[in-house]
Image (tube, rainbow, N blue to C red):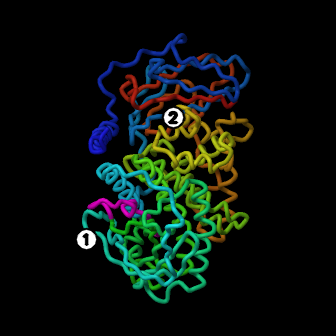
Amino acid sequence: MPRRLWMVGLSSLLATACSSSPGTQPPLAPCRATSGGQVSLGIGAYTVIDPTQTAGCAVFPANPAGTTIEYLVVPQSASSIPDDSQAFKLGGNPLAAPRPPVPLASTFGPNVVQQFDLRLRLSEREFAAQVPRPLLAPPRAPALVTPVDSGHVRTFKVCNTLNCDPRKPTTLSTVTATALKVGTHIAIFVDNAAPQPGLTDSDLNNLRTVFDTRLYETDTLAFGGESDIDNNGMVIVLMTAKVNALVTSAQCNSPTGGYVAGFFFGADLITTAPFATGNAGEIFYSIVPDPSGTLSCPHSVSAVTQLVPVTFVHEFQHMISFNQHFLVRGNFPEDLWLNEGLSHYAEENGGRTFLPDTATFCRYAFGDLYNSAQYFAAPQNYFLVDTAGIGGLANRGAYWLFVRYLVDQVGAALGSADSVTRRLDGTELIGAANVSNATGGTAFPTVLARWALANYVSDLPGFTAPPELQYVTWKFRTDYQTMKTACAPFFSTGNLPSQFPLTPSVVDGSAALAGMLRAGSGSYYRLQQAASAPGFTLLFSNSAGGALRTTLVPRLNVIRLQ
């Protein structure tokens, strides 16, 4: 499909996907003992019911035992359509009137920093849809490399607004910078107009070391190679005051504000006007120290030296992904939710190379843990498949958790964790198709259902989860407290939970439940069936009692806990 038509089609699809209208189809018939969706499970066994194939029914047998049976029930949307959603009801017949959709948790949505990140990634996809298909990127040729010498002075075009767009030249400013430190893979340029005093020679040496000898290797092993369109054999780290000034001091201190620590922009790797910045090179932009806050909010030298490497390892994955998907294979950049999930995984993965240095690991992994806790606290309120836009912190927690789960599950089969992430980046596939391919052909809805169940049962005390329903690297029920204690000397850990925050409501077979299905995510219920209780049925329907949309890919995931 031509790229321009693809983009038009996407706009129409998004408009449809966001609709949660129950439609005009007739109500589903009441479930009976002989209806489809029969549930017969031993402890530890699970099933995934497609309500579009069972007329919405799930049928549970009687409990002849003298003890309570307990199931985890997770109504979920396995849709790969961006931001797809629909209201649902789950219960017996007749169902009580549905409650209004569950409101979003009392957290802020995307702040200005996340919105800037979103604009960059959306711009890359938009430009990819309009520029001519690039020639396949040639192999890197070290013999032809033009080295960047320390002391070299050059100019760059740098975004000067959160609404950066190379088609609008006023959104780019010219910056003159000097290469102060050059390594094997990284050249650090510092803005000649940066506030003084800035980074010392020792600070710059330390940054060069961590970029050049640790983070560069970690990301390229995990995700593949970046491009080298400027043929200098280097990734440029441009530390410039323009990044500090992207937000005002007021924005920086606002609850919905924050500041941009650094970024990558795919327009630097596009040479077709008007979509190119003109830099034609691999560049990571970062803030500079500004202890007095002359540019925006203050940033100390120590804060910059600690934060910028974490940002680099995140943004470098975006750079590699853009190269692998667009420049090497001529396809669209990765879907936003998966692209962002891989970059958040890159933070944790980079941090692990410092262990047993807990202080440094905390800097890299703490944000991902915090975000995941926000998601676990109310997963039904947030999308995983969020291609239409990068959400707030809870959404990012979902992205990281999903990639972390994929790496844990597929790594053993492929031989290493890096093999999983290299497969996800080194392909022309994107989104759901990419996930399915990375797992060896497992259908995307199946992967989502297993992930949804793993989120609760992976390390559930007194319960042995099937191997495919487990995280391997993290045991969240104990690791939140472990990390809260370990990171306390370095962070304000008050908002990191001590207890696992995913706490399903406890219901029985007569429950009348209602909520909203959001693409990729689900609602969690512990359904208890008393000793000697008769069988019961659940009807999984839209808010009007009719069939859920097939495009929503609704699933009722059930695992027996006891």
Q: Main secondary structure of the magenta part?
A: loop
Residue segment shown in magenta? 261-276
- Mark 1, residues whose alpha carbon is within 10 Å: few (<14), some, or many (≥20)? few
Give the structural element (helix, strand or loop) at label 1: helix
Q: Which mark is residue 170?
A: 1
Give the structural element (helix, strand or loop) at label 2: helix
The residue under the point 48% across, 18% down is 54
**Location of the N terminus (image quadrant):** top left
- Mark 2, residues whose alpha carbon is within 10 Å: few (<14), some, or many (≥20)? many
The residue under the point 46% across, 46% down is 382
486 or 227: nearer the viewer: 227
The residue under the point 38% across, 34% down is 86
Residue 269 magenta: yes
Q: Which mark is residue 329?
A: none
Give x and y (percent) for residue 421: 57, 49
Work out how far the residue at label 2 is from the one at label 1, CA to CA, in angstroms: 43 Å
Give x and y (percent) for residue 456: 62, 40
Q: Amino acid at mark 2?
A: Phe
The residue under the point 48% across, 78% down is 299
1 or 33: nearer the viewer: 1
Q: Which mark is residue 444?
A: 2
